[in-house]
Image (cartoon, rainbow, N blue to C red):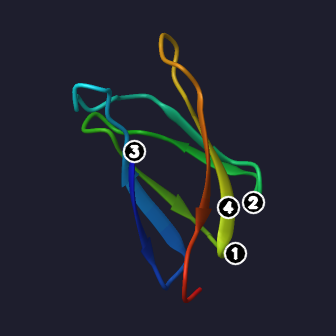
Amino acid sequence: MSLLWAQDGYITGVIVSEDQTPIHGANIFSETLDIGTISQVDGRFTLSKVSQNKLSLTISMIGFKEVKNTIIMDGL
């Protein structure tokens, strides 16, 4: 997973497998903000309405191990 953060309140990223193949249909959920989205065909996703600089993200997909990360962003 790679992430980018922008000052106008959103996070974008790409979900890929261990061999760097994009994962389509992965669930990305922030327990911190109670918002979520699904990755596109190219593995990209966007979470909008990000209003905190520390988020817990959970990425899940059938057939893959669930991943939980805490993201800390400077400057929000």
Which mark is on residue 8?
A: none
In this view, the mark in front (3 or 1): 3
Which mark is on residue 33?
A: 2
Residue contact between numbered discs 2 and 1, judged by CB atoms under 8 Å: yes
Residue 68, picture quadrant: top right
Residue contact between numbered discs 4 and 2, judged by CB atoms under 8 Å: yes
The disc labelled 3 sits on which kind of residue? Met
Q: Which residue is mark 1?
A: 52
Q: Is residue 48 above or below residue 45?
A: below
Residue 72, picture quadrant: bottom right
Q: Is residue 34 above or below residue 68?
A: below
Q: Residue at x 53, y 58 (%)?
A: 47
The disc labelled 1 sits on which kind of residue? Gln
Which of these two is toward me, 63 or 39? 63
The disc labelled 4 sits on which kind of residue? Leu
Q: Position of residue 75 (x, y in %)?
A: 55, 89
Q: Secondary structure at mark 4?
A: strand
Which of these two is toward me, 6 or 69? 69
Image-based side of 51 in relation to 17, left or right: right
Q: Which residue is mark 3?
A: 1
The disc labelled 2 sits on which kind of residue? Leu
Query: Gap between marks 2 and 3, in whole Å?
Result: 19 Å
Image-based side of 25 in relation to 66, left or right: left
Query: Gap between marks 1 and 4, in whole Å?
Result: 7 Å
Label 4 vs 2, first from the N-terminus = 2
Q: Which residue is mark 4?
A: 55
